[in-house]
Structure formats: C-alpha cells, structure tokens
Image: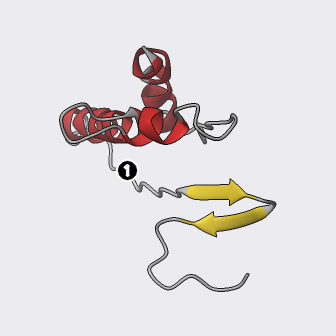
Amino acid sequence: DVFSDASALVVSVLDGYNVCIFAYGQTGTGKTFTMEGTEQSRGVNYRTLQELFRIANERRETVSYEIFISVLEVYNEQIRDLLDPAPSSK
C-alpha cells in the first residue's frame, strides 16, 4: 500500500525533481520493514528503485539520466549515511 502511494514519485524524480521518502515513528512500529521489507516481500526502497531504473531504461533512447541516491538514518539527533562503507564522525 505504501509503495502504491510512493511509486508516483519515481516519475517526479525522472522529470528532474528531488524526492525524499521519509519514514518516521516510534521504535517498533515497522519503519524498517516498510522501507526494506524482506527478500520475499521487498519494501518501498527496493520497489521504488526497481521502478526508477525500469522507467529510466524505457526512456534510454531519448533521455540520459544521472541518478544519485542517499540513505540516511537519524537517531538520537545523529545522522548516519547508511551507504557509506567508512563512516566518519561528521
């Protein structure tokens, strides 16, 4: 259900807009599951990226894209880049 609402944002990204999908709530309410899911039932992150690259591939004859992705965690007022293999203290 969440992905069906978020999937429209993919077209916005490919039309040149910046997009943020933000999960907020108390501990234990399912944010991680909603965003990541499981291997059998992928979450919003995986499904959105799959759709993003599917549409970009469909348009490859007419449009060239440069795509940048960030995955951040904000916890106890600390921001952590979840894609950084060597996190710093910044």
| Element marked by disc 1 | loop
Kindly indicate the quadrant of the structure image that contains residue 35: top left
Is residue 33 visible in this depiction of the protein?
yes
Please say if 25 is above or below 79. Answer: above
Q: Report which residue position mark 1 lands on.
A: 65
Q: Position of residue 28 (x, y in %)?
A: 58, 37
Q: Nearer the viewer, residue 31 or 84?
A: 31
In the orientation shown, which residue stands out farthest toward the right? 77
Graded by Cα atoms within 10 Å as few (under 14), some (14 to 19) or many (20 or more), the crowding at tag 1 reads few
What kind of residue is marked 1?
Tyr
Residue 76 relative to residue 81: left or right: right
Q: How is the image coloured?
A: secondary structure
The residue positioned 48% from the left and 56% from the top of the image is: 69
Is residue 14 visible in this depiction of the protein?
no
Q: Position of residue 64 (x, y in %)?
A: 33, 49
Q: Position of residue 59 (x, y in %)?
A: 25, 35
Q: Position of residue 42 (x, y in %)?
A: 28, 35
The residue positioned 56% from the left and 82% from the top of the image is: 87
In the orientation shown, which residue stands out farthest toward the front? 28
The residue positioned 25% from the left and 31% from the top of the image is: 41
Residue 72 relative to residue 69: left or right: right
Total marks in image:
1
Kindly indicate the quadrant of the structure image that contains residue 39: top left
The residue positioned 45% from the left and 32% from the top of the image is: 34
**Quadrant in which the N terminus appears:** top left
**Quadrant in which the C terminus appears:** bottom right
Q: Nearer the viewer, residue 40 or 15?
A: 40
